[in-house]
Image: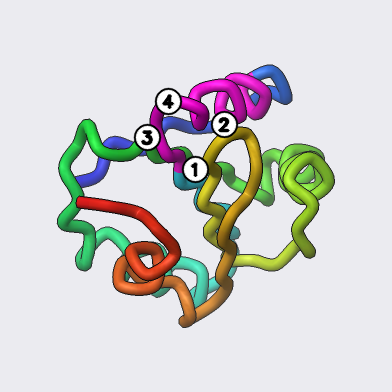
């Protein structure tokens, strides 16, 4: 089981940007009301084979924290979608995917290493 870190404050988004200079960060934007979002999250968790210390993983519940979902999109200059995964490196979003395009293989292709 992945050890998701919940994002509940804007300050955490800035901390993720800072952390991403030393360690890649993955942010998953999840709608708890959407079955497709649950399926994409399940697939991501099932495929996950990256070393625990290789990447920091974060999660935002966009129903409970809609303002954070908007803030993430603005901060990292990506169009909001849900579900959506963002790969943050060196303070910037270097890759994003949504819906059933979310996969470990594509994150690897975008530069995430195991």
Q: Secondary structure at mark 1?
A: strand
Q: Residue 100: x, y in percent?
A: 47, 81
Along the polypeptide, which appears first: circle 2 or circle 3?
2
Q: Residue 31: x, y in percent?
A: 59, 59
Residue name at image x 56 percent, y 70 percent: 97
Q: CA separation, marks 2 and 3?
A: 12 Å
Residue that mark 1 sits on: 59
Q: Nearer the viewer, residue 101 or 67?
A: 101
Residue name at image x 67 percent, y 23 percent: 14
Residue that mark 2 sits on: 7
Q: Quadrant of residue 44?
A: bottom left
Q: Secondary structure at mark 2?
A: loop
Tell whether label 3 touches label 1 (CB within 8 Å): no
Left or right relative to 27: residue 111: left
Q: CA separation, marks 1 and 3?
A: 10 Å
Left or right relative to 15: residue 39: left
Q: Secondary structure at mark 3?
A: strand
Q: Nearer the viewer, residue 76 or 33?
A: 76
Neighbour tally class for label 1: few under 14, some 14-19, many 20 plus, Cα within 10 Å: some
Q: Secondary structure at mark 4?
A: loop
Q: CA separation, marks 2 and 4?
A: 19 Å
Stretch in magenta? 12-25
Q: Residue 79: x, y in percent?
A: 78, 64
Q: Which of pointers 4 and 3 indicates the residue nearer the eye?
A: 4
Determine which of the numbered discs, if any, sits on residue 48 in the image: none
Q: Looking at the picture, does residue 112 appear above or below residue 23?
A: below
Residue that mark 4 sits on: 22
Residue that mark 3 sits on: 56
Tell whether label 2 touches label 1 (CB within 8 Å): yes
């Amino acid at each position: 089981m992945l050890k998701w870190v919940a994002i509940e404050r804007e300050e955490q988004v800035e901390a993720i940007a800072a952390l991403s200079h030393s360690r890649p960060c993955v942010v998953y934007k999840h709608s708890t009301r959407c079955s497709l979002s649950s399926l994409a999250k399940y697939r991501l968790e099932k495929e996950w084979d990256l070393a625990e210390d290789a990447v920091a993983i974060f999660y935002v519940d966009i129903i409970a924290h809609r303002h954070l979902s908007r803030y993430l999109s603005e901060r990292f200059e990506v169009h909001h979608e849900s579900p959506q995964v963002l790969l943050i490196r060196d303070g910037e979003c270097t890759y994003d995917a949504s819906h059933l395009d979310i996969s470990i293989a594509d994150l690897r292709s975008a530069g995430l290493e195991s």
